[in-house]
Image (tube, rainbow, N blue to C red):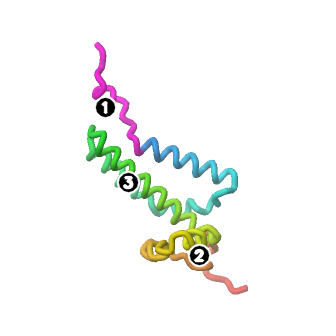
Amino acid sequence: MKKNNSEYEKENNVGLFGATLLVILGITLLLNNFGVIPWSIWQVLWHFWPFLIIMAGLEMIAGTSSFAKFIITLLGLLLIISILIYSLSIVDLKFQKKVNEIYPGWKKIQNILPFKPEEEVNQIIIFPGPKKSI
């Protein structure tokens, strides 16, 4: 018996968001391997893991509606890019300065989220513990 499109989609529904997430994860790991992005970015990204559960739930709510899944994937992609930019600006002060030059309102966003972009935040994240005076 030949299956129609909707039956095929139900059986092979990986989800557009899941596929996009895997591509972005792969690109991030590749950039880590080439030294473009520091490995310490994962210490900041780890704090955003509940985002994956939220996006999975939203994709389940969307059901078989391709328009709703497209909107959810687009929203998720924008949030993932924002999270990556935020995380990279926390662990790389040069990147943080460039982002602040390009988009001055980024400082307001950084002040809302858990880590504060201070001069010594890179050492706090990479080497947790009491502050040492040199």
Establish if 101 lies above or below 30: below
Magenta segment = 1-17
Which residue is painted at 60% across and 50% down in the image? 29
Which residue is painted at 58% across and 62% down in the image? 41
Q: Check disc 2: other Cα within 10 Å, few if <14, some if 14-19, many if 20+.
A: some
Q: Going by the image, does 80 lie left or right of 6?
A: right
Residue type at the position of mark 3 = Leu
Establish if 10 lies above or below 112: above
Q: Check disc 3: other Cα within 10 Å, few if <14, some if 14-19, many if 20+.
A: few
Query: Which residue bears the numbered disc 2?
Result: 121
Residue type at the position of mark 1 = Lys
Badge 2 marks a residue whose secondary structure is: helix
The numbered dot on residue 10 is 1
Q: Going by the image, does 129 lie left or right of 62?
A: right
Q: Quadrant of the C terminus?
A: bottom right
Q: CA distance from mark 3 to mark 1?
A: 22 Å
The numbered dot on residue 75 is 3
| Residue 127 in view of the camera | no
Circles 3 and 1, Cβ within 8 Å, touching? The answer is: no
Q: CA distance from mark 3 to mark 2?
A: 29 Å
Which residue is painted at 27% across and 45% down in the image? 62
Establish if 88 lies above or below 22: below
